[in-house]
Amino acid sequence: MKQPDRNQQQGAKSNRPAINDEIRSKEVRLVGADGEQKGIVSLNEALRAAEEVELDLVEIVANAEPPVCKIMDYNKHLFDLKQKQKDAKKKQHQVQVKEIKLRPATDVGDYQVKLRAILKFLEEGNKVKITLRFRGREMAHQQLGLAQLQKIEADVTDYGVVEQAPKMEGRQMGMLLGPKRKSKLYPNKKRSLIAAFFYD
């Protein structure tokens, strides 16, 4: 019968099932390596069956009466579990909120640089907060800022959607973009950003 690697055994026993001679029940409900139900057999018979195919006897349902045990390669089982956990972790994406700062009247070159950064963040699955800073008399021309945000929305339409409409906070106007999916804020796209800003 194969013995699990020492490194696999170092975790607390409470974190893994009983295997081979750790199983204490006199009888077990045995499941073969191929998943076939073998019925209730003595522990010794189950251990012999596992030994014949050079695999382990693993208690997979300890609180059953009698416990359910399966014949398997326990080390391979642990490896597969860790691989699945690793793959699942890779698929998980920690959404971050990136911030891009602009002026109400940004020149074309600078705008293109900022736009590329916005698109990159959205493609990576992140949210992007767009912040426009008004200075002095620019506060009297907030429509310029809204027009800038409206242009950004149009330019990122294939990559993101508006999750938070433009809002003034002090001398700053902000808008939040999220990765492309069905927009809850403007599901039918009938209202412009300017309308949302002035009338919501």
Image: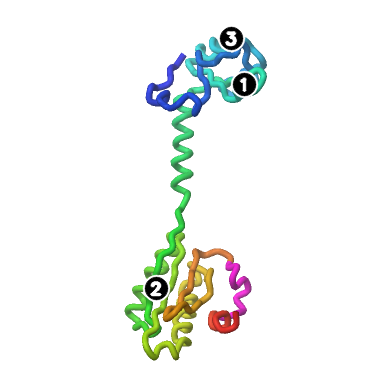
Task: Please tell me whether residue 138 is drawn above or below residue 44 in the rendered image.
Answer: below
- The residue shown at (53%, 18%) is 57
Q: Quarter-wise, where is residue 98 in the image? A: bottom left
Q: Amino acid at mark 2?
A: Leu
- Label number found at residue 115: 2
Task: Please tell me whether residue 94 is drawn above or below residue 76 in the rendered image.
Answer: below
- The residue shown at (54%, 10%) is 48
In the image, which is nearer the foreground, mark 1 or mark 2?
1
- The residue shown at (43%, 21%) is 4
The mark that comes first in sequence, 2 or 3, is 3
The mark that comes first in sequence, 1 or 2, is 1
Prevailing SS of the magenta stretch:
loop
Distance from label 1 to label 3 (Cα)? 14 Å
Q: Are marks 1 and 2 in contact (CB under 8 Å)?
A: no
Write down the residue under mark 1. Answer: 68
User: Toward the viewer: 27 or 142?
Assistant: 142
Task: Please tell me whether residue 176 is drawn above or below residue 91 in the rendered image.
Answer: below
Distance from label 2 to label 3 (Cα)? 69 Å
- Label number found at residue 102: none
Q: Amino acid at mark 3?
A: Glu
The mark that comes first in sequence, 1 or 3, is 3
Residue 150: x and y, percent?
49, 80
Q: Quarter-wise, where is residue 45 in the image? A: top right
Q: Which residues are magenta?
A: 183-192
Q: Amino acid at mark 1?
A: Val
- Secondary structure beneath dot 3 equals helix
Residue 186 in the magenta stretch? The answer is yes
Write down the residue under mark 3. Answer: 45
- Secondary structure beneath dot 2 equals helix
